[in-house]
Amino acid sequence: MKKTKDINLPQFCDYTCKYAAFSDPNSVGACRRELAVWCKKFKRYNNKNNKCLGR
């Protein structure tokens, strides 16, 4: 079964997305916490500026 793409999601993962949240500092290190984005929609981490998980 092929997944459909959600065109309402941004092309790239960053904090402008309504599903984005700051990651836990313990997960990636306090000084690097802005490199990982917690996606509330998919309940996973994604690298900032990486392709959106829903696209």
Image (cartoon, grey):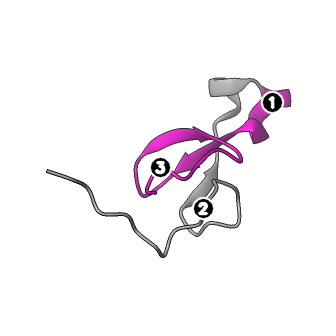
Q: Quick one: which residue is furthest to the right in this view?
A: 31
Question: Which label lies toward us, 2 or 1?
Answer: 2
Specify whether residue 53 is painted magenta.
Answer: yes
Q: Quick one: which residue is furthest to the front in this view?
A: 2
Q: Position of residue 22 (x, y in %)?
A: 67, 48
Label 2 or label 1, whichever comes before in sequence order = 2
Q: Quadrant of residue 47?
A: top right
Label 3 or label 1, whichever comes before in sequence order = 1
Q: Identify the residue at image location x=40%, y=50%.
A: 42
Mark seen at residue 53: 3
Q: Identify the residue at image location x=60%, y=58%.
A: 20
- Secondary structure under badge 2? loop
Q: Position of residue 38 (x, y in %)?
A: 56, 46
Asked if the residue under mark 1 is in contact with the one under mark 3, i.e. CB atoms within 8 Å, the reply is no
Q: Is residue 1 above or below residue 44?
A: below
Determine whether, in the image, residue 14 is placed left or right of residue 19. right
* Viewer-nearest residue: 29 or 44: 44
- The residue that mark 2 highlights is 11
Q: Is residue 49 above or below residue 7?
A: above
Label 3 or label 2, whichever comes before in sequence order = 2
Around disc 3, counting alpha carbons within 10 Å, would you say few (fewer than 14), some (14 to 19), or many (20 or more)? some
